């Protein structure tokens, strides 16, 4: 998978910001695959979230929250879905971004 290769290269070359984007992309891929397993997608999103927070990449941070919200909604974890979607929406409004 190309996204996994991208993650590997970003780590090898020390490209922290791109690593965060690759992790988020892997979370999106896992979410869109329709897998019944939440843990792998959740792990990618949470790693991307941590890295984006560490590097101050707020738009990506909001995207990670949105991704987690969508993932949780797919798996009927409504309380968690609402929590992450609210955070994403709030962050986007603060940055004058459209959701």
Image (cartoon, rainbow, N blue to C red):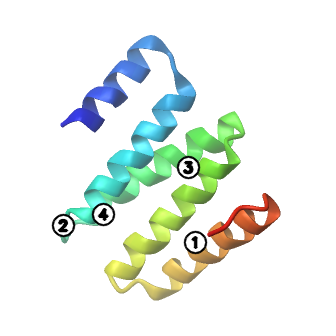
| Disc 1/disc 4 C-alpha distance (Å) | 15 Å
User: Image height check: is 25 above or below 82?
Assistant: above
| Disc 2/disc 1 C-alpha distance (Å) | 20 Å
Q: Circles 2 and 3: CB distance less than 8 Å?
A: no
Residue 91 x, y percent position in the rendering? 73, 63
User: Image height check: is 35 above or below 41?
Assistant: below
Mark nearer the viewer, 4 or 3: 4
First-in-chain label (1 vs 4): 4
User: Image height check: is 72 above or below 24?
Assistant: below
The residue where tag 4 is placed is: 31
| Disc 2/disc 3 C-alpha distance (Å) | 21 Å
Image quarter of the C terminus: bottom right
Decide: few, some or many residues near mark 1? Use Cα within 10 Å; few <14, some 14-19, many ≥20. Answer: many
| Disc 4/disc 3 C-alpha distance (Å) | 15 Å
Image point 50% across, 16% down: which residue?
Answer: 14
Q: Circles 2 and 4: CB distance less than 8 Å?
A: no
Image point 33% across, 28% down: which residue?
Answer: 6
Residue 64 x, y percent position in the rendering? 52, 56
Q: Secondary structure at mark 1?
A: helix
Q: Circles 2 and 1: CB distance less than 8 Å?
A: no
Image quarter of the N terminus: top left
Q: Is residue 37 left or right of residue 93?
A: left
Image point 44% across, 12% down: which residue?
Answer: 13
Decide: few, some or many residues near mark 3? Use Cα within 10 Å; few <14, some 14-19, many ≥20. Answer: many
Q: Is residue 51 left or right of residue 35?
A: right
First-in-chain label (2 vs 3): 2
Q: Quadrant of residue 31?
A: bottom left
The residue where tag 3 is placed is: 49
Q: Which numbered marker is on residue 35?
A: 2
Decide: few, some or many residues near mark 2? Use Cα within 10 Å; few <14, some 14-19, many ≥20. Answer: few
The residue where tag 1 is placed is: 84
């Amino acid at each position: 998978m190309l996204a996994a290769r991208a993650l590997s290269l970003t780590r090898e070359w020390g490209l922290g910001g791109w690593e965060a984007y690759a992790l988020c992309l892997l979370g999106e891929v896992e979410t869109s695959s329709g897998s019944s397993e939440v843990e792998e997608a959740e792990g990618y999103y949470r790693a991307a979230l941590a890295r984006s927070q560490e590097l101050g990449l707020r738009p990506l941070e909001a995207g990670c929250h949105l991704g987690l919200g969508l993932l949780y909604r797919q798996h009927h974890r409504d309380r968690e879905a609402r929590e992450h979607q609210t955070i994403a929406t709030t962050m986007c409004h603060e940055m004058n971004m459209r959701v």
